[in-house]
Image (cartoon, rainbow, N blue to C red):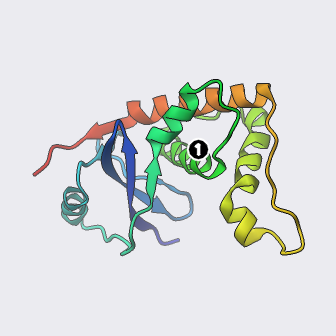
């Protein structure tokens, strides 16, 4: 199966950063020779790196992954409101990074699979694209226990993500 490479943009600590995400038989992120995720401060630096490797990027505007919003939600333990789209995008990113670096993010899928499905079906994509017109919009209800597990899972993902990164100096 062919592999397609994409620019992935995220905001964390109020700064934009870029990495290479790929899609093929499995999704993942590009690693350096030490098994870390090279991260760039600009899309231009990422593109130079990819050119040096002889890879070709799919020409599309990268979606911004709002990891600052994810972190803010994790830290706001009083909030019972869940931004399904934001958390789902972050979860998928953490899962792809974990798979790439041989990590164990979300190792207990038995405990988290239902939460993942609630995020997926509670988001705009499922409600606007996948939902039959005659069905009501799905807005999941979250128990305190589910919110705690969701926060723990997302915090573990963010920690794993940060530990996997290798900032590349600008050229």
Name the residue at the left extreme. 171
| Secondary structure under the numbered disc 1 in the rendered image | helix
Q: Which residue is mark 1?
A: 91
Who's the residue at 39% across and 73% down the image? Answer: 60
Who's the residue at 52% across and 39% down the image? Answer: 70
Who's the residue at 23% across and 48% down the image? Answer: 41
Who's the residue at 40% across and 64% down the image? Answer: 62
Q: Quadrant of residue 132?
A: bottom right
Q: Is 32 drawn above or below residue 75 in the view shown? A: below
Residue 100 as seen in the image, left or right of residue 25? left
For this rendering, which residue is in front, 159 or 30?
159
For this rendering, which residue is in front, 99 or 95?
95
Estimate the x, y position of residue 147 in percent, counting from the top left: 72, 30
Viewer can see residue 143: yes
Estimate the x, y position of residue 43 in percent, counting from the top left: 26, 59
Viewer can see residue 103: no
Residue 160 as seen in the image, left or right of residue 16? right
Q: Quadrant of residue 153?
A: top right
Estimate the x, y position of residue 36 in percent, counting from the top left: 34, 39
């Amino acid at each position: 199966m062919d592999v397609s490479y994409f620019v992935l943009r995220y905001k964390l600590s109020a700064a934009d950063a870029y990495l290479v995400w790929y899609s093929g038989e499995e999704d993942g992120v590009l690693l350096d020779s030490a098994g870390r995720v090279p991260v760039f401060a600009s899309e231009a630096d990422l593109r130079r790196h990819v050119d040096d490797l002889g890879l070709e990027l799919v020409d599309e505007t990268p979606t911004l992954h709002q990891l600052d919003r994810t972190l803010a939600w994790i830290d706001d333990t009083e909030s019972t409101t869940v931004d399904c789209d934001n958390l789902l995008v972050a979860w998928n990113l953490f899962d792809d990074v974990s798979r790439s670096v041989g990590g164990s993010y979300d190792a207990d899928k038995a405990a988290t699979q239902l939460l993942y499905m609630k995020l997926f079906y509670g988001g705009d994509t499922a409600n606007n694209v996948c939902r039959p017109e005659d069905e009501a919009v799905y807005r999941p209800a979250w128990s305190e226990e589910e919110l705690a597990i969701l926060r723990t899972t997302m915090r573990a993902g963010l920690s794993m993500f940060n530990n996997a990164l290798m900032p590349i100096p600008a050229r």
